Amino acid sequence: MDLRRLELLMHVATFGSFSKSAAVLGIAQPALGRQIQKLEEECGARLLYRHGRGVSLTPEGEQLIARARPLVRQLEAIATDLRHGREEPKGTVILGLTPTVCDLIGLRLLTALSEKYPHITVNVVSGYSGYIHEWLVDARLDIAVLHDARRSATVAVDPVGIARLALVTPRGMKIGNRVRRNIAIRELQGIPLALPGRNHGLRRTLEFAAGHAGIALDVRYEVDALRLAMDLVKGGAASTVLARPAYKPALDAGQVSEVRIDEPTVETRLMVAEASNRPVTQAMRYVRQEIKSILAQLAQTSGPEYGLVPLT
């Protein structure tokens, strides 16, 4: 099977259009169409649906790309390492960060990498933990920082930090007829919450703690968007539970209130994750090390400010 044709199919699937793909790739549209047709002949199956809006993958096309993408990335990584093994680190790393981690280290990380390794290009993608995990497994990401990621046959994880969770409420909201600075986990019962879906690490952590305390959470809004969750809190519609970096700007601006969760403290583990079925490039190793270094430094020097706990 021709590797170049697989790459062309991935481009067409990404853009959903032969014309857009041809323009980006700098090749004639008829030539692109012929290459895809030859790939379909090789596979003995139709890989794309043609319709008025462009093209989309058939089930066979989706299966082919799902299985081929890791192989293509692996071959690209091998070629990159061979080219640059004795040179200054080079290459592109697609990094997935949760909103909390993006707010916490995103700017610091990109600045540090730009200064130390100017030939490493980092493409940052942000999303909730469950989505980041899916994208990592699907080979859309090289590295990710997740909350309470589960080690599996497809994902290798390395703990890099611990972040404490707190209840974030509308400004000055009373709990039990008074404004609180601390709350026991069992007292979350009955408080309207805006939380991400159950497939995300933070939600799983909170549900486990609530179940252990013998309560059920009142999740009024399932929101997989941090900004919308914070808008609901600012507007008084609900409270949420987050690690401090995610809500610190709103807290500093006096837009929300913070209630620490005690009895017991609820924490989420931050983990660097990589797909175990793909090789780790030189550029990925440097990015991973910089992430670990920044998180360790923040936990040691600014832990209370950001709700971070050093790894022991």
Image (cartoon, rainbow, N blue to C red):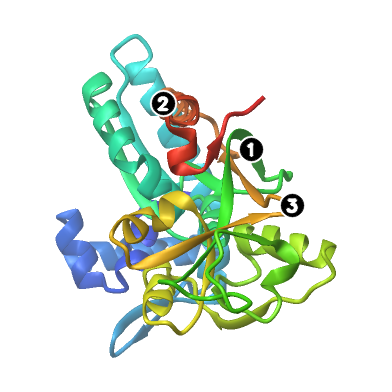
Task: Indicate left or right for 214 with 66 as reference.
Answer: right
Q: Amino acid at mark 3?
A: Pro
Mark 2, secondary structure of its residue = helix
Q: Are marks 2 and 1 in contact (CB under 8 Å)?
A: no
Indicate whether 113 appears above or below 106.
above
Marks 3 and 2, Cα distance to the nearest angstrom? 32 Å
Name the residue at 34% across, 9% down: 86
Identify the disc placed on residue 290. 2
Q: Amino acid at mark 1?
A: Val
10 Å crowding of disc 3: few (<14), some (14-19), many (20+):
few
Which of the two marks, 3 or 2, is nearer to us in this view? 3
Name the residue at 39% across, 44% down: 104
Give the residue furthest to the top: 86
Tell which of 84 and 193 is nearer to you. Answer: 193
Tell which of 105 and 155 is nearer to you. Answer: 105
Identify the disc placed on residue 264. 3
- What percent of the width, then of the height, locates residue 112? 28, 27
Disc 1: which residue: 157
